[in-house]
Amino acid sequence: MQVYYFYRHPDEDYAFIRKEPSDLYILDYVWVDCVRQDVVGHVESWQEKIQGLIDVQINEFHLQDILNIEHPCSFDTMEDYDFLIFRKLITPDDHLHLDEKNAEPHQSEFGLMTTPVAFTLSPRAIVTVREKGNRAIESYIERLHALMLKPEEEQNKTRKLPSTPLNLALRILNSMIDDYLQLRAPLTKRVEYWQQELLQGHRFFRQWRQLLQESMAFQQVENLCEEQIETLQELRDEIVENYHHLVGEQRTEGLDIMLVRLNDLVSHIERIQKHTARLRNSIQAAIDLHFSAISNQTNENMRILAIITAIFAPLTLLTGIYGMNFEFIPGVKSPQGFWLMLVVMLLCTLFLIIYFYRRHLVGRGEKSVIDMLAQQHHQKGVNLFWFLEIEPIKQTIKSVEKMAKLK
């Protein structure tokens, strides 16, 4: 447990931070930073220490929520304080000391690990409960320690210290949400990997189970972002309705500034949610392209088989005719009949190949899609009864039609 006191000089207008209490300065608020090991197994003694430091008694149900490492993001209000739980993404920079029993609830199906951080906000104090090794909070504490090495009158010059518990909570939340923003790059790489696996085309795709888990993981990230947005919206409503309850009488920062910072946090989470939704849609589009490619390959195979069948169909017809058991068939007893039949069959084959080639059923890869559509339009205009358009035949048909009408 670490305690930090935020003071203001009574005569000169500057703020500073100390780790020891003092009666010579005006106390703005107290930050009590605790790790989970301080609470587990010592709930009653820990509650007494907190009550002695900040004069706030934490509700027993909130104590249970603090001990529950599976608790989702939530926000609750009490008469003396507000209670907020926000789940932080565990990154490689974090060095959490978790055994197998405690690490299992943190693990999600995707492999992303999150851990809850509890905030207890009152007008004059803030209490945080986290896992040991939480880099987002520890890095902020390191900056505070660096400031405490400076003279008191210079601590608030380079970067303003948080003047209220709410301001401090928003800064910690901002550092935690930044970890989610860094999640976009590895998620994009995962989508690119699955797109290559689905669309490479040189072998069958068999990793459907892993792909389904990945798709569910993206959905879980979206659900987590939705929980975080709802929690921050509830906090925003509380700020708008009971701002004095959160900052006390010392209102050194306006309501508008707090709302701007909170809206900025919500916009960051919405960016993560929208990016994850786009990635999930990209995976679905890759799946659709995969099945379209398979369908196209199947159609191509059927086209080749149909062409082969069409080429050999006349040959089968000819061999079937000359295989009939009739006493007299032209050319059966001729010494040149066999060779003539082979020539006819070869000519039929060449004629069909040329015909299919002209119709772009063979060698269609040499034509573009536009050329094939234009060729199809041209073929639609071909008149199979072109010989009826010859003028003498046309006149004869007209005369026959007139005679039919006279009758």
Image (cartoon, grey):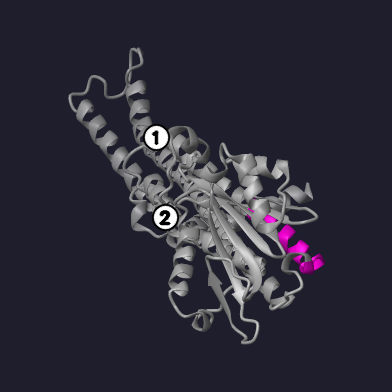
- Residue drawn at x 46%, y 40% as measured from the top left: 211
Q: Position of residue 62 (x, y in %)?
A: 69, 45
Q: Is residue 399 visible?
A: no
Q: Give the numbered dot on residue 186.
A: 2
| Residue type, mark 2 in image | Pro
N-terminal of the pair, mark 1 or mark 2, is 2
Q: Report the Cα–Cα distance between label 1 and label 2.
A: 23 Å
Image height check: is 42 above or below 74?
Answer: above
Q: Position of residue 218 (x, y in %)?
A: 53, 48
Segment colored magenta: 226-244
Label 2 near label 1: C-beta < 8 Å? no
Q: Position of residue 400 (x, y in %)?
A: 67, 50
Regarding mark 1 in the picture, which secondary structure is present there? loop
Instruction: Mark 2: give few (<14), some (14-19) or many (20+) Cα within 10 Å.
Output: few
Q: Is 319 or 307 nearer to us in this picture? A: 307
- Residue drawn at x 78%, y 69% as measured from the top left: 244
Q: Is 377 or 139 nearer to us in this picture? A: 139
Residue at numbered disc 1: 206
Q: Position of residue 83 (x, y in %)?
A: 70, 53
| Residue type, mark 1 in image | Arg
Magenta residues, dominant SS class = helix
Q: Quadrant of residue 177?
A: bottom right
Q: Is 293 or 38 nearer to us in this picture? A: 38
Q: Is 258 or 275 nearer to us in this picture? A: 258
Image height check: is 348 above or below 177?
Answer: above
For residue 400: magenta? Answer: no
Q: Is residue 3 visible?
A: yes
| In the image, farthest residue toward the left | 335
Q: Is residue 118 left or right of residue 234?
A: left
Instruction: Mark 1: give few (<14), some (14-19) or many (20+) Cα within 10 Å.
Output: few
